[in-house]
Every structure is written in structure tokens, then in C-alpha cells.
Amino acid sequence: METARKVITQLRQPSKSYALLVFLTGALVFVAAFIKYFHAFTLTEWVMIYSMIAAVLILHYFIFQLPPEGNYQSLDSSVFLASIFVFGGTFALTVLFLSELVTMLIDRKTTWWKHLVNFSIYTLMISGASSVYYLLGGQLGQFDSSRTHVYFLSLTVYFCINVLLIGFYFLLLHKGKQFEIIKSFFRDSLFAYLSTLLLSIVLVVLVTNNRYFGLFLFLAIACLLSHAFRRLFLMYNELSEKANKDHRTGLFSHSYFEEKLEEAIREYRDQERSFSLALLDLDDFKKYNDAFGHPQGDKLLSFFGKLIKTECESRQLLAARYGGEEFAVIMPEYSKAKAFAFMNELRKKVNDTPFDGVEVFPHGCISFSAGIYEVSKDNYYKSQLVDLADRALSMAKEKGKNTVMIYGEQNQLPQSIEKEIHDLGQQLKIFLSKDVYTFKHSKRVYSYAVDMAEVLELSDDDRRLLILGALIHDIGKLEIPRDVLNKKSKLTADEWEMVKKHVLWGKEIVLATGKYKDLVPLVELHHERYDGNGYPYGLKNEEIPRLARMLCIIDSFDAMTTERPYQVTKTLEEAIEELNRFAGKQFDPELVVPFIQYIQTKMTTGLKRELEGSEEAI
């Protein structure tokens, strides 16, 4: 009963169910082929069968790997194909059956069911190729150069069956990567199979002219080629390892970390696989370098890197050297709470690990500060995640180092927001000479954002992002010609397309400053619509960051209720009606509600005049 339960549990896994289906199909095809085409082999044919089995076993010894991981190939397929071309499909299946039986007895490391599935896959490949060979008029026992297309089409079927059967198995194991896996199979396996076709034709020619000596010559060539494939793959792995690893610490490199971070973001979006990102900074490393010199400092980096690597690898986390004494860890399926618990445990372990010269550190031990950010629907590209984790790291350092902080859970901002508002306000005054409307509009939107940050009870960091983002959300309009910005009549189609580009130009301006690049989502996406009909990307629903959705409401409301060159001004009541009408279409239906309540509260408390005209000085 217990065995049956285990079997049922295993079969609930799509990959295991698929493997069983392939085995049953292959077994049925094998039995059917022998019932239909079986004939008694002569003594000479049995000798050739055993010779072919020996060739398969020898080539199987020279097996080599091709991407994706877990996909192994050998040139034994050339023996099976040559057997089809010279002796027929039944002969090839006999060679397969007996060679697989010997392999099962020799290779005890591979589980029995994998041997059976492998046998079934080869059965389907051989049956498919031999059927095509017969249907196209292929002749047994000789090589016909005028029928080269028959050999090629037989191999094509053989190759396609292999790619489809094995490829689909890998798709079940690695959901969400269908295109990449199929592409990898075709790109990396095609050359090996073309070599297999050429070798099978070589074997046909050699065997038909001088059977056993020809088979010996073929084996010599095939073994050398298999060895070359294996060496090339090992060299490729070594080069990849060097490119992806940091020599000093043994951790992954910065470039590999960025590649894997993008992959984690794609998995989060496609499969909702959450993850947390941590940035670590070795505390007071410069002080240690100054005291003992760079060689000893390199030893400390190496020691610290190995500690991180050991702890992360045991938990299947990806750790990388981000640069200098900074490190990064990607934690798949880790909530911020779980990530915090791990990083704090790691911090304590580092504190308790002795190392020469730690007495120069303020804490008297090796220590690090760390910032954590759990991916959420309010971020949409790689640099933002790093910025937010780095902001938490900065807060950890400000709190005295040797501590771990989670982004969004700081009690206060690491620096005064007033100074940032003042600095951005000065930059905003550039609009005074070019477009007074945009200058005043930005100030009003900023004022609304200050109030809505309170209404929504945003964290300190989100409050900062919304307020500063509101202040400079239209900064890209600096790139629009003065005559278009101040045009009194309706814009032409070309002019409107130019105006729409201000979100992308704004993104470029903000990124150029460097300091405020975390404001990019608000600058770039505040004209996206909840229904997906906005610009520049046509994002919809929660694909748009929450603060950008809030800014869209504020920006639209101010645009409706203030005078514009080519649009009739709406009253506050009309604007509220417009917000309600487009809730769920242009605007987030949940965020519209508190904003309308806020406006109505303002109206009922006698501040209608303030809403319709006054602006605070920045």
C-alpha cells in the first residue's frame, strides 16, 4: 500500500507522468515492430549485431554533454542509423535492445527507469527514421549517392523526434523557458547530429565495402571525434566558469549576478516566483587595508567570500561579488522576513569567526552591513531593485554598521527630504523661462502628492518617491520646443507624438543625474493607463507601479481643473465625476477612492479656493 502511494505521488509530477507515457509508447512500438517485421537472423548477421553492440557500448563510454544541463549525447546514433541504412529497422532495434540491456547491467548509478525511458526514446527515433527510409525508397545493403536526400530526411526525423521528446521533458522541468530551451536544443544539438549523419554514411560505405575492418576504422574516427567534443565542452565550461566567477572570492561575478537578477525578475513576472535581494558591505574594510596592506586585505576578502559562499550554496542562494568590498545575494522564494533572518544569522556567524587583525575593527570582529529588498509589483526593472536594496544598506550603515535593514521599514529617512525638494525645485525653475504652465502644474501636483502621502500612510521611502517624483514628473518637457509647449490651438498628430515622448526624455534626464534614478518609474510611467491604453509601453493594472498609478490620478486631476491652452477647464465636481467614470479604465479604481475622498474633504472644509488656485512656495 505504501509503495502504491509513493508511485501515485511520483506520477503526480508532470515530468514523471510524461516519462511513463514515453516508456509505454516506446515499448508498444518496439513490440509492434518485431511482430510485423521479425525474421530469424543468420549467424553472419548475429556476428554483425554483436559487433554493432560493441561499437555502441564503446561510443557510449565517450558520452559528452550539450546544453541544457542534463542533456548528454554520444555518437552511438550513427551506429543505429547505419544499421537502418544497411540492415533495416528490425536489425537496428535488436542492436538497441541488447546494448541497452548490457548498459543497464554495467551502469548501476543510473536509475532503472531512466534506462527504460532512454530505450523507448531511441526506439521511437529508430522507428521513425526507418519508416521514412522505407517510404522514400531507401535501399538496404549499399550506399546510393543519388539518394542523399533520403538519408538526410531520415536523420531529420530522427533528430526532430529526439528534440521533441527530450525537449518537452525539459519544458516540464523548467516552466516559463520554452523558447530558450527549444532554441538551445536546436543550436547546440544540430552540429552533433549533422556529424552523426556524416558518420553514419561513412559507416555505411565502410561496412558495405569491408565490414569488420570498416567498422574498426569508423570506431577510431568516432572515438576521436567524441573525445574532441568532450574536450571542447570542458574548455567551454572552464571559460564560462572563469567569466562567471570572481577570482578573488570564488563567488559569482558582477556581470553574472546582473544576468541572474534579470532572470529572477522575469520568473517573478511570468510565474510569480518571489525573491529577495540583499546587498552586503564589509564594514571598515579601508581601515583594515590601511593597517595591514592590500595583500592582507585581499586575504580578508577571500575569507569573507568563502564564508558567504558556503552558507549560500547550502541554501541554493546565489552570492556574487558586487564590487570592491560589496557583495550581493539573490534569494529565490525568500520573503523579506525570511531573508532578514538568514542575513542576521550570517552576520552573527561572521562576527564569531576569528581572523588575523580583527582588533583594528571598531566591533573587534569581522562585520558587515546589509540592506534587503523583496521584489514587488511596484518595481519594474533591475536597477531599481539594486537602488532600493542599496538604500536599505545605507540606512544600516547610518545606524552604526554591523546590522541588517529591510527597505521600507526604516523609522526615518537617512537624509532630510527638504533639501532634496529644494534642490529639485531650483532645477524646476528652468521652466519659468520656457513654460510657466508646466512649472505651476508641477508645483500643484507636488502639493497634492504631499497630502496623498499622508492619506495613504506611505512609508518614509515611498513618501519621498511620490513627492519628489511628482515634483519632476514632467522634466522631459524641457526637450519639447517652446512653440509646441505654448501653442494655443490643438496640437497636430506629429506634435502630439512629440509631446508623448517627454516621459522617455524625462527618464534620460533623471538617469543622467544619477542621484535621483529611483524616481524614473514615476517620471516614465505616469501616463500609463490602468486598462493598458496609455504610453509609452501600454502597461496595465499592476504592471504599473503603485506610486505611478497614484501620480497618474493626481496629474490628470490637476490637468482637468486648471487652464490649459487646448483644453476646457473642468470644475472640481466635473473632475470628480470624470475620475469616477474612468475608474478601472484610465485610473486605478482602488486609488481613485481615497483621492476623491481627500478632494471632497478639502471642498467641505472651505479650502476650495486653495485647490483652484494657490500654490505653495518650494
Image (cartoon, rainbow, N blue to C red):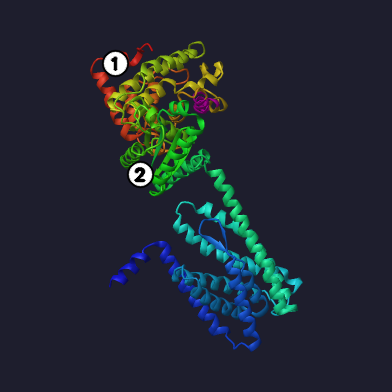
Which residue is pictured at 31% across the width and 14% down the height?
A: 610
- Label count reads 2
User: Which label lies toward us, 1 or 2?
Assistant: 2
Vertically, is 67 above or below 492?
below
Residue 240: % across, % down: 57, 47
In depth, the one of 308 and 57 nearer the eye is 308
> Left or right: where does residue 429 sit relative to residue 55?
left
Q: Are marks 1 and 2 in contact (CB under 8 Å)?
A: no
Provide the secondary structure element on which disc 2 rests: loop
Residue type marked 2? Tyr
Cα distance between the residues tagged 1 and 2: 48 Å
For residue 608, the mark is: 1
**Residue lying at 31% horizontally and 34% vertically, measured from the top left:** 590
What is the x, y in percent for residue 441?
42, 18
Query: 432 or 279, which lies in front?
Result: 279
Q: In the depicted view, which residue is nearer to us: 373 or 538?
A: 373
Most frequent secondary structure within the magenta stretch: helix
Q: Which residues are magenta?
A: 498-511
- Tell me which label, 1 or 2, sits earlier in the chain: 2
Image location of residue 447, percent across then percent down = 35, 18
Could you say which is closer to the camera, residue 538 or residue 66?
66
For the residue marked with disc 1, what is the amino acid?
Lys
Looking at the image, residue 461 lies above or below residue 9: above
Q: Position of residue 330 (x, y in %)?
A: 42, 42
Q: Which residue is mark 2?
A: 334
Residue 288 vertical position relative to residue 215 in the rendered view, above or below: above
**What residue is shown at x 40% (from left), y 25% (from top)?**
556
Q: Which mark is residue 309?
A: none
Indicate the quadrant containing the N terminus: top left, top right, bottom left or bottom right. bottom left
